[in-house]
Amino acid sequence: MGVTLDLSRGPAAAAVPVKPNLAGLTRAELAQALIDTEVVRPDKARMRATQLWRWIHHYGVTDFAAMTDVAKEMRASLSEAFTLARPEIVERQVSQDGTRKWLIRTAPGIEIETVYIPDVGRAGALCVSSQVGCTLNCTFCHTGTQALVRNLTAAEIVAQVQVARDDLGEWPSPKEDRRLSNIVFMGMGEPLYNLDNVAAAIDVIADNEGIAISRRRITVSTSGVVPELQALGERTGAMLAISLHATNDALREELVPLNKKYPIAELMAGIRAYPGLANAKRVTFEYVMLKGVNDSPAEAKALVQLLKGIPAKINLIPFNPWPGSPYECSDWKTIEAFAAILNRGGYASPIRTPRGRDILAACGQLKSESEKLRASARRRATAADPA
Ligand code: SAH
Ligand code: SF4
């Protein structure tokens, strides 16, 4: 018996015109939107955009009515033309260790996982996604098993920070004692394949009159898209993290297939040329610890050699297994021995303590809910129709 799968989410929405959302635009886009809709005269657009900017990004308001220094009639025309609504939060989970995870739906089929991890960075870090899915099939990464759905827009990246801030109660933007002090682009996707949107989002997040997270507290992690490194540095001023995971090309090609295109020597040359590299602005090298694969003392020594002369930190990441993953995490003793060799070589190498494991919030486990639903629907269909 055949089955028909209905994966739609209810009847198609009636054609209600969607109001443009101002909450994720850059300053220039915001001013332009005001002009294009003729809500504001062109000569007043910059002034008005600055005023709105503070309300949106410093106070975090989601309703024009809250903008008390904007005339009532103007507030009414703004809310007629635009919205400041947040995307839908499909799921929210809080781990016993304080890690929080949100599943945010910005459009049908676009479901984004974002994770807040306390006690990372200065106070706490938000791990944001830059794509839904990924085109690069790193063999140890759960996201890598999912096809790319699409790049996220700058607004969708900024929305992840806004949702986290709403939930942490961090509006207006606190000067001190923030819980969300750092941003890491270590969620789903390869940020350097979506650099335009990542750079625009960083402009919004780092703006001093808004969310005001300094560019030095924003880290972009890449699997090694060498031709984009220079542009990343010049356009964002962000801190660089490189997912290295192996010290020779043969093994790195296996773990990070992108290495076939940009081998280690090219990657290292690109990193050495990263704008602003200095002891105060070091590159973070991420190294996932895979049992019996890349965790020997010889590899630790090779890592020290490879990074010679680069202002670097090394983050050892215990592998987070996922259902069906082909690796195991190295034993704790092995990880400690590896770290000790790096330390003797002059590199601080903190071992990233696994966080939020009870809510599957760890690195490499982010995989959108829509994909999981599609997968389980496929399984159900196969079970129902073995033919
Ligand atoms: N695509 C970018 C950023 C997202 S991945 C990149 O690859 O750098 C963020 C980090 O999580 C990377 O260092 C990645 O290698 C690591 N990671 C992915 N899957 C993991 C897993 N199962 N266990 C531990 N770390 C993982
Ligand atoms: Fe993509 Fe990064 Fe996962 Fe590799 S590790 S598949 S680049 S998200």
Image (cartoon, rainbow, N blue to C red):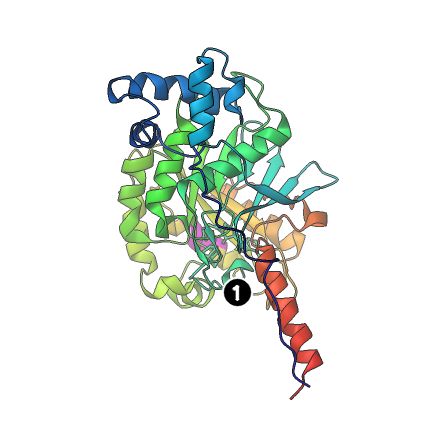
Q: Nearer the viewer, residue 336 or 88?
A: 88
- Per the image, the residue denoted by label 1 is 145
Q: Is mark 1 within 8 Å of ligand 2?
A: no
Q: Is residue 134 magenta?
A: no
The furthest residue to the left? 43
- The location of residue 125, given as percent across then percent down, is 55, 35
What residue occupies the far bottom of the structure in this picture?
A: 387
Left or right: where 197 falls relative to 327: left
The answer to which of 71 and 355 lies nearer the viewer is: 71
Q: Residues within 10 Å of mark 1 (few under 14, many from 20)?
A: some
Query: Within the magenta stretch, is there residue 301?
Result: yes
Residue at the spot 57% in from the left edge and 29% down from the top edge: 165
Q: Of 328 and 367, which appears nearest the observer?
A: 367
Q: Is residue 326 visible?
A: yes
Q: Amino acid at mark 1?
A: Thr
Residue 313 appears in view: no
Q: Image point 63% across, 31% down: which residue?
A: 167
Q: Which residues are magenta?
A: 300-304
Q: Give x and y (percent) for residue 377.
A: 64, 69
Magenta-drawn stretch, dominant element (helix, strand or loop):
helix
Q: Quadrant of the N terminus?
A: bottom right
Quadrant the C terminus occupies = bottom right
Residue furthest out toward the top: 69
Q: Provide residue 28's location: percent of width, then percent of height.
A: 30, 29
- Name which residue lies at 59% across and 68% down: 326
In the picture, measured across the screen, residue 307 lies left or right of residue 44, that is right
